[in-house]
Amino acid sequence: MTLPQEFICLLEEALGKEGLETALAGLQSDPAVSVRANTDKIPVDELARHLLPISSEEVPWCPQGLFLSERPSFTLDPLLHAGAYYVQDSSAMMVGEVLRKLLPSIGFPAGERLFRVLDLCAAPGGKTTHAASVLRSFFGNNFLLVSNEVMRQRAAVLCQNVSVWGDPCIAVTSADPSAFASLDSFFDVVIADVPCSGEGMFRKDPEALAQWSADNVDMCCARQKRILADMWSCLRPGGLLIYSTCTFNRKENDGNVLWAASTLGAEVIDLQIEWEGVLGTETGLSLVPGHVKGEGQFCAALRKKAGPLERSSSSGIAFTGKRGAPAKAPQIPSGLSEYLTDPCVFRSRGETLVAVPSVISPSVGELSPLHPMMAGTALGMTKGKDFIPDGDLANSLLLRRGAFPECEVSSDTALSFLHRETLRLQDAPRGIVLLTYGGIPLGFVKNIGTRCNNLLPPSRRIRMDIR
């Protein structure tokens, strides 16, 4: 690729002459392929065996991450559709590692037992799903992760990826960062992977290179400052801001971190370098092609200076089904709670019944002014005398295994299901059946004897030729 001279100058300013030469060579090489296991569904070593004969090796800064020796056809792997893993650039996994590393140092406000995190610029969902795994490993079900994406179309993709991942403690919103200012001291951690000039995407996205300019760097820098300033009040005193970009220049990285520390009131946390190839900067860590296998990523952490804690408490605001309209009290089918592993509060979203874990329900209620697009797990809907389960329930960690008859299927049958074809399961019982692949829930069918009605949501259908 031909790189702009202005970009090369900014890169040398950030990396020095020796670092520049390594980076320029790396930018001319092929990008690496990496995935991250959902260890609440599959162990990493089992995922590695599943991906054979493609060989893999662990991502040094992410025990759940694997580098792959080649890129498989992910679309034709049923385990991807079951939420068993996420295809994510290895460098982007550093954000989740920083969260994991710093969580033990964050104090909790007196009397609080629910940990609350905001992923401010979340689509398509890589950092959200990673953060959810980290938070679950620390807190079990006692956390709320609000995953926000201002662009509505991208937020819809985020919803789908979060649903397939299956963690019921995630709520998805689509709001401008300024909308969170009203939630005074609501969050213990804010992850801000802010929109940037995208220098770290040059190898994967030619459009990122075509759109790059020094003026765009300055515009992004100003926008990033606005985003941080707009949301700052929603982070509690003593809380943690994890700031990241997929770019290299100092303006958008160290410059903005130092600006936030001096202007907003925070201290920069020293992130120790523990991995070969990861570069230290004035305020954080930089991952650069050539130095590491992945793409470009910068990550820094700041602690908001302590002050009077005025954290909002549960207001009891009702979760809304439609904008401005309180949710109607839903009719709960008999025995529905037996499908779930944890106590839940039930809500209505149109005709669909939704389960929100009881422990996060009050905090979800406080998000009502932001009109969450989703929270908890969609369970299904009642049709006549039958309850038809939603595809989200199949993927959710809330699903109690054994609640439905299960049928383990082959790869061919799993792909036929994901193609929304009519199936015939000779040995399966009649009624609702949960299909599994590799022991992991994939989705529901209704077996009527001679054939099965495919209950996969149409939006999740594989559209490519599977034969």
Image: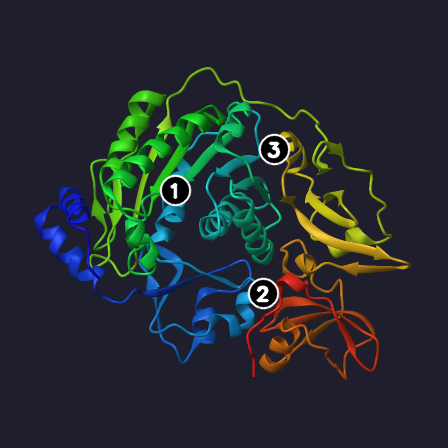
- Label 2 or label 1, whichever comes before in sequence order: 2
Q: Write the residue at 17% across / 45% down.
A: 6
The reply, left or right, for residue 14 in relation to residue 448 is left
Give the mark count: 3
Label placed on residue 370: 3
- Label 3 or label 1, whichever comes before in sequence order: 1
Label placed on residue 82: 2
Circle 2 Cα neighbour tier, 10 Å, few/some/many (<14 / 14–19 / ≥20): many
The reply, left or right, for residue 357 in relation to residue 326 is left
The reply, left or right, for residue 328 in relation to residue 221 is right
Q: Which residue is mark 1?
A: 195
Q: Secondary structure at mark 3?
A: helix
Closer to us: mark 2 or mark 1? 1
Residue 93 in the image: state x and y as whole percent: 38, 53
- Measured along the vertical axis of the image, is residue 126 above or below residue 448? above
Residue 78 in the image: state x and y as whole percent: 56, 72
